[in-house]
Image: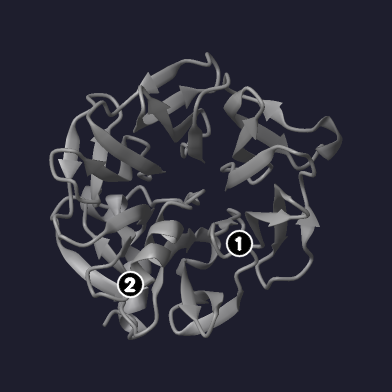
Amino acid sequence: MVRGWMLVVALGFGGISVWAQSSSTSGAEAMGWIVFSSARSGSGDVYAVHPESGEIIAVVAGDSPEGSPRFDAANNRIVHQRYEGGRTMLVSGDDDLFPDPAAENAPSWSPDGWWIAYSDVRGGSEDLFISRTDGTGERQLTDDPEIDRYPSWSPDGTRILFARKEAAGWVLSNLDIRNMEAGPRRLSSPTEYAGHPVWSPDGTTVAFDMLFEGQAEIATLDLESGAVKRLTNRPGNDLVPAWSPDGRVLAFGGQPDSTLNWDVWTVDIESRALTRLTTHAAFDGGPVFVPAAAIRKRERDGVNR
């Protein structure tokens, strides 16, 4: 049961926030850490790996299943899901924030820290919602027969990117929350599957996973030209991309046929070079980049145990 829950939350990732870096920050400091869900402790926890040194530390390691980390940039905090007592809570450190409004797909935090976006199945259809980060003021964004899933805030907080399943297939769509009457704008052509879209830090490109010849791969979509670039090409499955703060690297969860194991990987956007960051026999996946300061804060708070 625990392992199944970990797989659901890890594959339900939908977004990433963007943070600013000081120009005086060193290269290693600017890259930060990659936090991810892991089953290596047996119950489900949150770990972090340094993308350059390869150091791995436990960020959250409690008795209850925990996972699906997010970064709330405005408050410089890592937020994750905790499954306990038959309910899923959104948690930061040791503080319960509020019950997760959509337990299977962790929400995406807005860049200003005031809102979360998520999908939920109600009345037979899966639609998009936003609410304040205290769980109040819920607002429904889509209400249609299509499946709307994996919302991701734009860097300026004005638009929400998401995956939509239409009759012809999965597409990536964009919703301007300043002009809801205009409705969603389709960004890609229908395909067998496309999911987990995330904006690049500069807002010009979308990273996502999609099926190529029956296997899930990481790809990017240029928003100006509409060109799709396939970044991974190997037997197995690569899912849930996350941008580095400089926009040069994507982290993702990969299960190549060569290892048959879910681990955290990175791919260079230009060279398409792959790097395997974790090698544990247990599940590792659903990575998110966070600044080094967020990891240090967790250490000061005594949460890294």
Q: Give the residue number, with chain letter if any, for mark 2.
A: 45
- Quadrant placement of the N terminus: bottom left
Camera-side residue of 51 and 4: 4
Foreground disc of the pair 1, 2: 2
Point out residue 201 in the picture as x, y percentages from the top left corner.
46, 39
Q: Position of residue 282 (x, y in %)?
A: 21, 62
Position in image of residue 220 (x %, y %): 42, 27
Q: Earlier in the sequence, mark 1 or mark 2?
A: 2
Q: Is residue 252 above or below residue 289?
A: above
Q: Is residue 33 visible?
A: no
Q: Secondary structure at mark 1?
A: loop
Three-letter amino acid code at the position of disc 2? Asp
- Taking the spot 74% from the left edge, 51% from the top edge, the residue there is 124
Separation of residues labelled 1 and 2 (CA atoms): 24 Å
Q: Residue at x 31, y 39 (%)?
A: 238
Question: Which numbered circle lies on residue 283?
Answer: none
Q: How is the image coloured?
A: one colour
Q: Position of residue 291 (x, y in %)?
A: 36, 58
Name, please, the residue furthest toward the right.
181
168 vs 68, left or right, is: right
- The answer to whether residue 254 of the structure is visible from this angle is yes
**Residue that carries the numbered disc 1 in the rendered image:** 113
Residue type highlighted by circle 1: Gly
Contact, mark 1 vs mark 2 (Cβ under 8 Å): no
- Left or right: residue 95 versus residue 32 is right
Name the residue located 21 percent from the left edge and 57 percent from the top edge.
50
Question: Within 10 Å of the Cα at label 2, are there few (<14), some (14-19), or many (20+) other Cα atoms?
Answer: many
Where's the C terminus, which quadrant? bottom left
